[in-house]
Amino acid sequence: MKKKWLFLILSLWLVVLLIVPLFSSLQRVEEPAINPALRYYMCHRPAEPIIIDGRLDEPSWKKVYWSEDFVNIDGKRRPKPRFKTRAKMLWDDQYFYFGAELEEPHVWATLTARDSIIYQDNDFEIFIDPDGDSHNYYELEINALNTVWDLFLVKPYRDGGPAIHGWDIKGLKTAVYVDGTLNNPADQDKGWSVEIAIPWEALIEAAPYKKKPGPGDQWRVNFSRVEYQTVVENGVYAKMKDKRTGRPLPEYNWTWAPQGLINIHYPEMWGYVQFSSTVAGQAKEYCDEDPAADVKWALRLIYYRQRDFFTQTGRFALNLEELDLNKEKKLKVKNWDYPPMIQATSNLFEVIYTNKKAERWHIRQDGLIWKTEAN
């Protein structure tokens, strides 16, 4: 009798161990309030070696164009950022180069240990998803003291992560230049600039075919800036606090490509960087628009709704009607069969769009998106 009870208890624990992680990783996913802004940037090659000193004064940097000015992370629903932020990119056979310029009248930073939670200071952040499937991507944060935090995310947090904090970019080069005086409230600064070189060897693990990009390839990238409101206390900068709670006020989040919500970990909203063989300044080129952007967004809309449906019912829907999406015009994508195929069990789903060439785009319950083609 005791053996039966022991077997029953162990069986129940096994169910808990298997089911609880599944359900905890399938929480509701908030849907962005905007469509992707589809930012594009043509990345050229430098004409001379790039010296990482934070100044962005090499001729090649001067010849490539700036990104669009950063906007509030959730789009135009919020006021224009208080200070200007913009970025540039270059690439060669060894490195992916990033330069950023951050307007800031009071440059400050406190964190000095590598892999500190850098966004607790004002910072600049880079996010890179080489194959654009929203899984296996890179994050790098840096403050005005040139302290970095680099990490690798297997999946976005909404899909269960995890974030690998012990991962480091081997061969990383970074530098910061402060146009003013760091941590000195007695004067006013113009801002700070960041220069970063990431070796391709650190990025190819998540890249298509585990190779560095070639001319014409596109990677998904976004940038974010964290900015706190400050006051001066006892001669040093301090975060401004809420008078009711005594806690620091929420930070501002300004990004290159807006997210439509206050969460940078939505890779489907990031920009596109296209790599060119042209040397900086030799020609004006335009990026190729993603021909699958509309069908991928249609899949993503179904994914958001499926995850919401799951939190309400404990299962995934079998059709668009159950999701109340059968009248959604964005799901009728030109040249792609409609309605898409939905395959679902109680805790798994896959949605597939197919075109006349037998190309297929897929998405599943953890947000992974991928393409297949008929043989």
Image: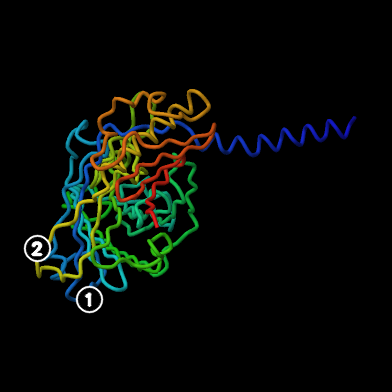
Residue 197 placement, left or right of 316: left
**Vertical side of 244 occupied by 23: above or below:** below
Question: Tag on residue 49?
Answer: 1
* Location of the N terminus (image quadrant): top right
| Residue name at image x 85 percent, y 32 percent | 4
Q: Circle 2 sits on which residue? A: 284
Question: Relative to residue 184, is residue 302 drawn left or right?
Answer: right
Residue most toward the right? 1
Figure quadrant of residue 205: bottom left
What residue is rendered at 18% in x and 59% in y?
42
Task: Please identify the quarter of the rendering in which residue 149 is found.
Answer: bottom left
> Where does the image place residue 195, in percent across and percent down from the top left?
26, 63
Kindly identify the amino acid type of the residue bearing the numbered disc 1: Pro
Left or right of 130? Residue 281 is left
Query: Marks 1/2: CA distance?
Result: 21 Å
Q: Are marks 1 and 2 in contact (CB under 8 Å)?
A: no
Q: Is residue 235 shown to the viewer in this render?
A: no
Q: Where is residue 203 in the image (x, y as percent from the top left)?
A: 38, 63
Colouring method of the image: rainbow
